[in-house]
Image (spheres, helix red, strand yellow):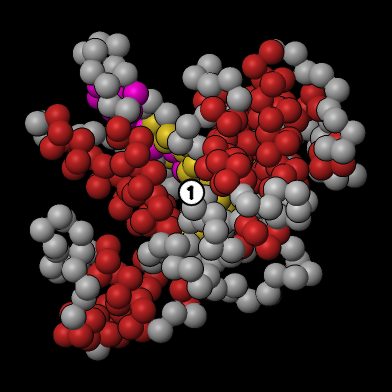
Amino acid sequence: MARKPRYEVADPAEIQVFHAVQRCVRRAFLCGDDPFSGQSFEHRRQWIRDRLEFLASVFGIDCLTYTVLSNHLHIVLRSRPDVVAAWTDEEVARRWLRLFPHRRKPDGSPEIPSKPEIDMIVNQPEVLAQRRQRLSDVSWWMRCTAENIARRANREDECTGRFWEGRYKLQSLLDEASLLACAAYVDLNPIRAAIAETPETSDYTGAKDRIDDLAEREDRTRPNTHDWERSRRRRKSGWMSPIEINEQDDPAGPCLESSGRRASSKGFLSVSMAQYLELLDWTGRQLRDGKVGVIPEHLSPILSRMGLDATGWCDVVCKFGRVFKRAAGTPESLAKEAIRCGQHWLCAHQNPLGLSSD
């Protein structure tokens, strides 16, 4: 059965959350040390991280977390057409010209767009509407990631041809349970792959960036990280969305970001960053040791709210990529998504999140 067109899965006009995976096609590694050639491509990890940070400052898309591994990368993204709709026409044009500049500086960075260049977009309503839509389109984010890295890698390898295995894989995350499990799955990938022992040693992950920023925080005695997460003081992780979403304090609207590093300052989980990182650390130790222990008492309510126990949680984090296909969520969420897509069912293991249907 042929895959559905991307526009039927990822609608840039809707706020949606996705897990995207892009794999390298060639035997030579995307990053790390290639055992066949003996070359090190470790520097390419920084290329990808820098590119993701740049795209987060341009697109109306929130990057929730990411991981760059030796031959593939994982990204969790949330499209924000509500944010893009709040931008002026000139802002849309300026952002598009940062992605596809007419002129570049000697170092390859885009020149500041001139007024005639901006007017060429602003004065054409159809072109402007198209550019506005693309700036909240996950497919265009992935295109701008993959094409840039492929060109740089081909130039470095002095070759031509396909660099990526094919078009990226995309999973819809339908509810908070699947989003929490997917974020943990992505952040713990280096531990599952036996590349790292702990989240704080898992380089080029969203979790590591957040942990590094916490280590640099001046006042570590303050338990509340809600305001600090939304500040401009997060040097490494400030381009990603805050973790905690506070329905009482966060504005109901698009929640525009003033720092210019990300689309918005809205969180995505009903847990604090400290709680998420603690849960991540505990889960990583269970996966590494291969035996599930007793979850700490203060973390247990996080899983209990979603109907999960420690065993079910560790199992779904470990096997997330295998038990879910095009969409991830509770049985109820998957059933609703199947109806929306005009299908009888969506491929996933029976009750993969282990949730009660009560």
Residue 23: within the magenta? yes
The quadrant of the picture occupied by the N terminus is top left
Query: What x and y, as percent, mark residue 229?
Result: 63, 57
Which residue range is magenta in the image? 19-32
Q: What residue is drawn where x is 14% and y is 62%? A: 105
Label 1 residue SS: loop
Q: Nearer the viewer, residue 302 or 319?
A: 302
Q: Nearer the viewer, residue 234 or 37?
A: 234
Lateral position of residue 267 relative to residue 144, left or right: right
Q: What residue is drawn where x is 48% and y is 48%? A: 236
Residue of label 1 = 236
Q: What residue is drawn where x is 78% and y is 27%? A: 312
The quadrant of the picture occupied by the C terminus is top right
Query: What x and y, as percent, mark residue 213?
Result: 56, 46
Lateral position of residue 130 relative to residue 80, left or right: left
Q: Quadrant of residue 131?
A: bottom left
> With respect to residue 348, does 192 lie above or below?
above
Q: What residue is drawn where x is 18% and y is 80%? A: 114
Number of numbered callouts drawn: 1
Residue 27: within the magenta? yes
Lateral position of residue 264 relative to residue 152, left or right: right
Q: Quadrant of residue 228?
A: bottom right
Q: Amino acid at mark 1?
A: Lys
The rendered magenta stretch, by its main secondary structure, is classed as loop
Query: What x and y, as percent, mark residue 323?
Result: 62, 29
Query: What x and y, as percent, mark residue 328?
Result: 63, 42
